[in-house]
Image: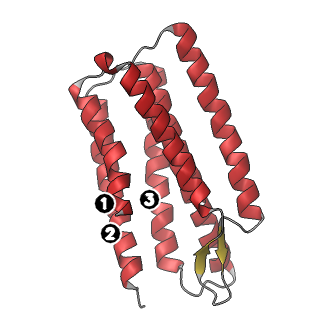
């Protein structure tokens, strides 16, 4: 089985992403309260992070010449990687609202906005995927990104901007361990772009 240099680099990034995800969650767990809502939120976020990276690994192993069932596996894994990345960004944003103990009225408003925004994004991603504009198999029977693939990155970046604004507004409430974990969350995607 031949793996191209690009696929190998993407696989390495996915494995590093899994390791960094585990490290980030460990750092955050050291600084969180032990209530059920936060624990449930972490379970969801951690699972979404791992599934995102696993989906990316599946895509990299099966991206060249997918046919039959492999074709659907590649398309599903690619689509799920976007959804899981957005779900991870959502859980991190909600966690940020919870851990900063934002005033009840503002906290509920931000939480409602984030949840409606998540549903809106999933509907947009479903439309983009089923219209063949997010992820597709091209004429050479290879995995390819459609015209709207940048939309997924923009959605994740929008969550990062929301988090940055919240953190700027409530920076006095953030502990060092949480700052470190969020620095990794903001910094790692920037490193993979370059």
- Disc sitting over residue 54 in the figure: none
Q: Alpha carbon of mark 2 to alpha carbon of mark 3: how far?
A: 11 Å
Q: Which of marks 2 and 3 is nearer the N terminus?
A: 2
- The reply to whether callout 1 and callout 2 are in contact (CB within 8 Å) is yes
The picture places residue 54, in percent across and down from the top left corner, at 46, 61
**Residue 40 visible in rendering:** no
Q: How crowded is mark 3: few (under 14 residues within 10 Å), some or many (20 or more)?
A: many
Residue placed furthest toward the top: 104
Occupied quadrant, residue 34: top left
Q: How crowded is mark 1: few (under 14 residues within 10 Å), some or many (20 or more)?
A: some
Q: Earlier in the sequence, mark 3 or mark 1?
A: 1
Q: Up-down: is 115 above or below 88?
A: above
Q: Mark 1 points at which residue?
A: 16
- Disc sitting over residue 12 in the figure: 2
Q: In the picture, which quadrant includes the C terminus?
A: bottom left
- Does dot 2 land on a helix, a strand or a loop? helix
Q: Mark 3 points at which residue?
A: 53
**Residue 164 visible in rendering:** yes
- Does dot 1 land on a helix, a strand or a loop? helix
Q: Up-down: is 105 above or below 153?
A: above
Count of labels in the image: 3
Occupied quadrant, residue 32: top left
Drawn side of residue 188 relative to residue 166, left or right: left
């Amino acid at each position: 089985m031949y793996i191209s240099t690009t696929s190998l680099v993407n696989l390495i990034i996915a494995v590093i992403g899994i390791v960094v995800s585990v490290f980030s969650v460990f750092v955050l767990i050291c600084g969180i309260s032990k209530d059920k809502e936060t624990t449930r939120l972490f379970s969801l976020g951690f699972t979404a992070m791992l599934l995102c990276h696993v989906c990316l690994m599946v895509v990299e192993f099966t991206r060249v010449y997918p046919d039959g069932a492999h074709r659907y596996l590649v398309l599903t894994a690619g689509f799920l990687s976007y959804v899981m990345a957005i779900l991870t960004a959502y859980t991190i944003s909600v966690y940020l609202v919870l851990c900063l103990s934002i005033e009840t009225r503002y906290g509920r408003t931000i939480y409602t906005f984030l949840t409606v925004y998540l549903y809106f994004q999933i509907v947009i991603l479903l439309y983009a995927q089923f219209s063949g504009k997010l992820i597709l198999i091209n004429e050479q029977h290879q995995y390819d990104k459609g015209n709207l693939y940048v939309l997924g990155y923009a959605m994740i970046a929008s969550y990062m901007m929301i988090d940055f604004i919240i953190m700027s507004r409530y920076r006095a409430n953030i502990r060092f361990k949480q700052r470190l974990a969020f620095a990794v969350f903001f910094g790692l995607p920037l490193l993979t772009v370059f």
